Image (tube, rainbow, N blue to C red):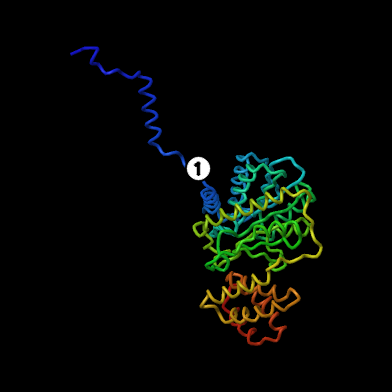
Amino acid sequence: MNSDKNRTPSLPRTAIVLFLLALICTSIPAAVPESSVDRLQSHVAWLTDTARQGRRAGSRGAADSAKYISDQFRQLGFEVQMQEFGGNRRNVVARYGSDSRIILAGAHYDGQGPGFPSASDNAAGVAVLLELAKSMKAANLSASLVMCAFDDEEQGLNGSLYFADHPTVPLENIYAAVVFDALGRRFMDLREWTTITLGEEYSPELSSIMRKHREKDMQSIGADLIGPRSDFAPFAAKRVPFLFFSDGTFKDYHGAGDTAERIDYMHLSRETTLIGQVIREVAALRARPAYLENPVYPEGETAGLVKLMNTVIAEKTNLQPAYRLMFEDLKARIRADRTRDSIRMSTSAFLALATPSHARYFLEFELKPYFESLHKPEIVKAIQEESAHSGL
């Protein structure tokens, strides 16, 4: 029967279409925002790809990397300039903000050359730099940001030296130069992390900030313990307040095994957050931090290094006699030593153990003469034996 009385009322066609669209949309999961971890991993993967040829300064791979980095900064809304300094080498300098007060963040992007991905040292640092540019821009700081990707660090800090001698902003306006290098891997390949920080000994204001953020896996030491071995050094020489962050060296340092898949990106993301918090607090300072003529070394420096020696002795069951003898001697010595000699040698012993490719240098030219001066023939003999089969 065709009775109007029994006919089911029909929905308007537009309503049916809208209903179907709503049903389809609710069945499709919302796009997951790209996380900090994903972005960090993506940057490291691009920089360590074999097409980059190891990013050795002056190479096509390094020049391509500089363009990639500059493009990333431009996409974030930064003003970018290439600071050329000869030999097909260039710093990438990006600025956001017009305030005369400046926070500088820097990391070198060059690597060891073909066959060497240079992931921790220092594609990871560049990834952190780019991630900080994104988060710090969103933070709407009361100071300007200058982000520097330095070239040719590996051959002698040449990019950062050039910037310090030819700054794009007045050095006296820089509240702090925050530099990071060799991130995302565990120091000495230990089970626990050791995030190493330097520089607070020259500034009470920066020291105060760092004390608030110091965690159990952080070791603050004086910059004199490692010497001018990264891009913070040219700023220190110009008396620019600085902080340096590193996870230290490891068995693949400057080797073919420094690959992207060996980076711990979750830890790298946490370190990015930490550095960002420090930058926020430096930007909030009312006056430029002081630069002390006579450094005041961090509290807990000695105790932290003794703890690290104990960890190495306990964890590395196959520790060679030279290192075991040196650490046992130095543990007792640095507690009573009023000079910085024994604490410097402790760091040299760590670096020799952590970095097989450079062990012979530390053993022959730093540790052996030191223990000879102390008339420790047993330790000297063990060092000589260890040096004989160590890397240059």
- For the point 41% across and 39% down, the residue is 29
The quadrant the N terminus occupies is top left
Does residue 59 sit above or below 7 in this rendering? Answer: below
* Residue 231 position in % (x across, y down): 69, 58
> Which residue is drawn at the image coordinates 67% and 41% (left, top)?
140
Q: Is residue 182 left or right of residue 366?
A: left
Residue 314: percent from left, percent from top = 54, 76
Tell me the element at label 1.
Answer: loop
* Number of numbered discs visible in the structure rendering: 1
In front here: 297 or 51? 297
Q: Amino acid at mark 1?
A: Pro
- State whether residue 231 appears in this view: no
Q: Which image quarter is the C terminus in?
A: bottom right
Out of 355 and 133, give the one closest to the viewer: 133
Is 211 located above or below residue 362 in the figure?
above
Residue 13: % across, % down: 35, 19
Q: Which residue is mark 1?
A: 33
Q: Which quadrant holds residue 55?
A: bottom right
Q: Nearer the viewer, residue 319 or 111?
A: 319
User: For residue 154, which quarter of the picture?
Assistant: bottom right
Q: Nearer the viewer, residue 27 or 69?
A: 27
